[in-house]
Image (tube, rainbow, N blue to C red):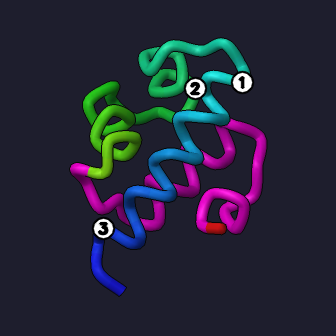
Amino acid sequence: MDSTTYTKPTGEKVRALRRERGWLQQELADRAGVNMQTVSNVETGRHDPELPTLLKIARALGVGLGELLE
């Protein structure tokens, strides 16, 4: 699977879940323990996040990893 098929849908899901919660990227970053640039890169598909980063983001959003990767 190339990073486009992996990252873009994942990033869109992260963005949608973050917006549902009314959070700015910085708030998600703070809750996940990552920097805001990481959140931005994940949401825009510019970054192929590593599993530990995705787990932190999923936990911060209160969802399972599988939901982000669907």
Circle 3 residue = 4
Left or right of 25 on screen, residue 45: left
Q: Is residue 9 above or below residue 3?
A: above
Residue at 31% in and 51% down: 45
Q: Position of residue 8 (x, y in %)?
A: 39, 56
Left or right of 8 on screen, residue 2: left
Q: Mark 2 belongs to which amino acid?
A: Arg
Residue at 41% in and 70% down: 6
Closer mark to the observer between disc 2 and disc 3: 3
Name the element at disc 3.
helix
Spatial CA span between label 3 and label 1 = 24 Å
Q: Position of residue 62 (x, y in %)?
A: 77, 40
51 in the magenta segment: yes
**Along the viewing direction, whichever of 34 and 61 lies nearer the viewer:** 61
Q: Position of residue 31 (x, y in %)?
A: 57, 26
Q: Is residue 30 above or below residue 64?
A: above
Left or right of 63 on screen, residue 28: left
Circle 1 residue = 20
Closer mark to the observer between disc 2 and disc 1: 1
Span shown in magenta: 46-69
Q: Position of residue 65 (x, y in %)?
A: 66, 62
Q: Local crowd at mark 1 within 10 Å, few (<14), some, or many (≥20)?
A: few
Q: Earlier in the sequence, mark 2 or mark 1?
A: 1
Q: Is residue 21 above or below residue 7?
A: above
Q: Quadrant of residue 16?
A: top right
Q: Local crowd at mark 3 within 10 Å, few (<14), some, or many (≥20)?
A: few
Name the element at disc 1.
helix
